[in-house]
Image: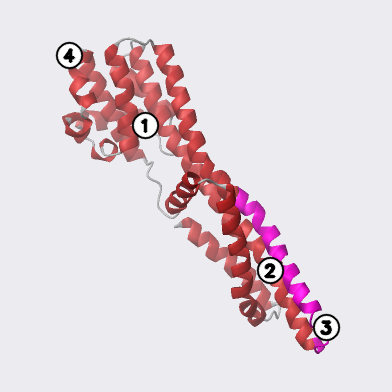
Amino acid sequence: MFVIIGWLVAMACIFGVYIAHGGNIAVILHALPFEMTTIFGAAIGGMLATNPPKVMKATMKGLGTCFKGGKYTKARYMELLALLYDILQKARKEGLMSIEKDVEDPHSSPLFQKYPVVGHDHHVTEFITDYLRMMVSGNLNAHEIESLMDNEIDTHHHEAFMAVQAIQRLAGGLPAFGIVAAVLGVVNTMGSVGQPPAVLGGMIGSALVGTFLGILLAYAFAEPLAGLLESKVDEDGKELQCIKTTLLASMQGYAPQVAIEFGRKVLYSTERPTFAELEAHVKKK
């Protein structure tokens, strides 16, 4: 929502000042369809040539998330930590083997069903159950599991960041594509040298619209989207770090109440629940 508001503010200020200074908006509107087709056609062609299909698919999916509200809220993190507390508490009281059925079939597990927000998130559920399965097997120590977690989180971050890089490359190319459109307009103008000055002036003005649009699309649209998607990728990784820290604290012998406190401390301050809020939520659940 805020990205759309930002675009509206930018457009209102740019074109509002242009019109207030006596600019003729008709010149821009007349050239807009042709220049936009040239710039967008070149940009999309460049993206298809640069990025493999999986990156293009991830980019389209990532762009969709930019127009949705953030899912990583304080309520979500409290539910996640409460889920981890229940799992670790059950394992502490009844032994690690008691959570084997929950790990093997989380979709039928009362523990995961109790927390639908994170329990129905396939990626989070898979991350939790994979490492709980290793804990149950008892073949790996805390340091080995920590190294494996770090590698998986790094891989996940790198994979998600490829979409950010694709948009950043697009933003870097848009001004150049705008110049290409402007040069074509100048070439067209030079081929009409015999026309009256008024006609030539309009053609030159239309050509310059290409440069204007390339710069505008790069820094008012593409770059903000890349920055917003990068923030979302970072938030996505933060949730995995919270799970990692909590499970490792449990493996090192800390009680569930203390282990989830380790996980809580990893979260950003804007979404991190207080100790009292988390304790009250866990007791309520």
Towards the viewer: 162 or 1: 162
Residue position for label 2: 210
* Marks 4, 3: nearer the viewer: 3
Residue 181 lies in the magenta stretch: yes
Tell me: residue 223, above or below residue 177. Answer: above
How many neighbours does mark 3 have within 10 angstroms: few (below 14), some (14-19), or many (20 or more)? few
Residue at disc 1, secondary structure: loop
Tell me which secondary structure the magenta stretch mostly adopts: helix
Pointer 1 or 3: first along the chain: 3
Q: Is residue 226 visible?
A: yes
Where is residue 53 shown, x and y percent of the image? 48, 47
Q: CA distance from mark 4 to mark 2?
A: 69 Å
Give the residue type at disc 1. Thr
Residue at disc 3, secondary structure: loop
Where is residue 224 shown, x and y percent of the image? 56, 53
Residue at disc 2, secondary structure: helix
Give the residue type at disc 3. Val
* Marks 2, 1: nearer the viewer: 2
Q: CA distance from mark 4 to mark 3?
A: 89 Å
Pointer 4 or 2: first along the chain: 4
Residue position for label 1: 274
* Marks 2, 3: nearer the viewer: 3
Residue for point 33% across, 18% down = 258
How many neighbours does mark 4 have within 10 angstroms: few (below 14), some (14-19), or many (20 or more)? few
Residue for point 50% across, 45% down = 55
Residue at disc 4, secondary structure: helix
Residue position for label 4: 94
Furthest residue in direction bottom, as rendered: 196
Where is residue 14 shown, x and y percent of the image? 64, 68
Residue for point 59% across, 63% down = 41
Pointer 1 or 4: first along the chain: 4
Q: Which residues are magenta?
A: 169-197
